[in-house]
Image (cartoon, helix red, strand yellow):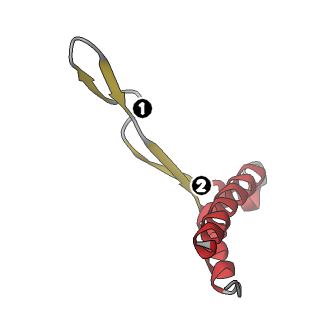
Amino acid sequence: MKRTFLLCFFLVAGIILGALIASLCAGVPFLSWLAYSQSIGFNPDAPFVLDLSVFRLTFGFTFSVSVAQVFTIGAAIFAYNHTKLR
């Protein structure tokens, strides 16, 4: 149970740290490639709509990942594998 929480912590920390690094490097010319990101998911302009005349349910999902986040998530998994928690 502790290992699962630790893995979640490392992954969330890697995602947040990667987003911060990507945001900081976006304006630096030789590091701007770290801020390159790609989005996948349902188009937020035209999400899936379920209209049942009584209520309307709208589904939308977008996931965006940058190069810096890929590196920091990899580093987080590496750090997780090298922790000695029992």
- Number of marks in picture: 2
x then y, percent, for residue 24:
78, 51
Q: Say which quarter of the image contains residue 82.
A: bottom right
Q: Looking at this view, is 13 or 33 the one in front? A: 13
Q: Secondary structure at mark 1?
A: loop
Q: Residue at x 52, y 49 (%)?
A: 64
Precedes in sequence: disc 1 or disc 2 = 2
Q: Say which quarter of the image contains residue 56.
A: top left
Task: Indicate which label's residue lies in the foreground, 1 or 2.
Answer: 1
**Residue identifier under label 1:** 44
x then y, percent, for residue 74:
61, 74
Q: Which mark is residue 17?
A: none
Rendered position, 44 above or below 53:
below
10 Å neighbourhood of mark 2: few (<14), some, or many (≥20)? some
Q: Residue at x 77, y 48 (%)?
A: 27
Q: Residue at x 67, y 85 (%)?
A: 86
Q: Secondary structure at mark 2?
A: loop
10 Å neighbourhood of mark 1: few (<14), some, or many (≥20)? few
| Amino acid beneath label 1 | Pro
Q: Say which quarter of the image contains residue 53.
A: top left
Q: Looking at this view, is 77 or 24 the one in front? A: 77
Rendered position, 2 above or below 23:
below
| Amino acid beneath label 2 | Tyr
**Residue identifier under label 2:** 36
Q: Residue at x 64, y 59 (%)?
A: 12
Mark pair 1, 2: CA separation: 20 Å
